[in-house]
Image (cartoon, rainbow, N blue to C red):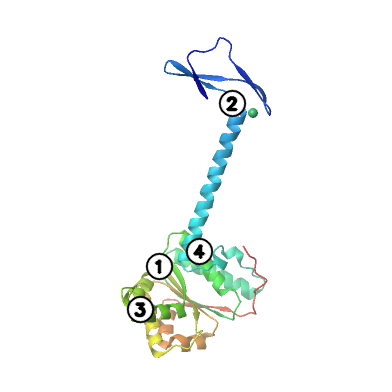
Amino acid sequence: MRMIDSMPLVPEAGVCAEHGPFNFRYQPMGPKFFVSDTCPQCAAALKVKEQNDDAARRQREEQARVERKRCEAGVGLRYVQSCFESFVAETHEQRKALSECVAYADHIAGGGHANLVMSGQVGTGKTMLACAMVNRLLSSGRRVRIVNLGHIVRDIKDSWQKTGCKTETDIIRELVQLDLLVIDEVGQQRGTETELLLIFEIIDGRYKAMLPTVLISNLDKKGIVEAIGERAFDRLRQDGGKLVAFNWGSMRGLRRTA
Ligand SMILES: [Zn+2]
């Protein structure tokens, strides 16, 4: 691009190595003229490339934003991309568990507040499916969190020592107010009397606020009752609470990565 004072009588021309000869283009600008001396086809191709690059960049940024949100919600890097389609259901039981989890996510997305217990051995895909639920609900704008029970207990115990940080009341209130709370690794360690009280307070608080809670455990029903206490388990079962059984061996290694 350059400026000239007057139009030449014969338009100037150039030759593009790729597209061959082309005429320069003139555009009046006040008393002067702009001369565009680049190949118009190259210019058009450059514009398309810039638009594509821009769209790709925006898509990358959006993907990063989604992943950041998922991580903040407690979804581990391993499951940040997980969706229901990532779960390979080969047996009748696996298909049943998958469809129950999908139905549950639909229920919550539709404003339902029933609770869910996911029970089964290590490596059966419980956490992955729970993360698929969390990922889905996050995309519809819900405030959702997945957290290990041990971490909740640790955070609350820490709050007793430290000053100036979140108090026990703050931590419990935050957990109670979430649109969906998924508590993973229930029963990893035997709960003390204090821990049982904390768990009850959270589950009961959510029950009273008519907000759904999902519990994930490697234990069976009896073990879960022992781990969280009869009263807390009772709350989970009210309002149509369901238990999904993951009664098969470890799927690790079979699972697709995407
Ligand atoms: Zn060209």
Upstream in sequence: badge 1 or badge 2: 2
Task: Residue 91 in the image: state x and y as whole percent.
Answer: 66, 73
Give me the residue at 58% from left, 31% from top: 44
Instruction: Say whether mark 2 is within 8 Å of ligand 1.
Output: yes
Pointer 1: what residue?
A: 179
Quarter, ligand 1: top right
Task: Residue 173 in the image: state x and y as whole percent.
Answer: 34, 73
Type of amino acid under label 1 = Asp
Pointer 4: what residue?
A: 135
* Cα gap from disc 3 to disc 2, whole angstroms: 66 Å
Type of amino acid under label 4 = Asn
Task: Residue 227 in the image: state x and y as whole percent.
Answer: 47, 87
* Cα gap from disc 1 to disc 2, whole angstroms: 57 Å
Q: Is residue 256 left or right of residue 133?
A: right
Pick whichever, 229 or 189, lies toward us.
189
Type of amino acid under label 2 = Thr
Q: Dot 1: few (<14), some (14–19), or many (≥20) neighbours within 10 Å?
A: many
| Outermost residue, top side | 9
Asked if residue 63 is positioned above or below residue 88 in the image, the reply reads: above
The mark found on residue 38 in the picture is: 2
Give me the residue at 43% from left, 69% from top: 180
Q: Which element carries disc 1, helix, strand or loop? A: loop
Upstream in sequence: badge 4 or badge 1: 4
Pointer 3: what residue?
A: 159
> Viewer-nearest of labels 1 and 2?
2
Instruction: Say whether mark 1 is within 8 Å of ligand 1.
Output: no
* Cα gap from disc 3 to disc 1, whole angstroms: 24 Å
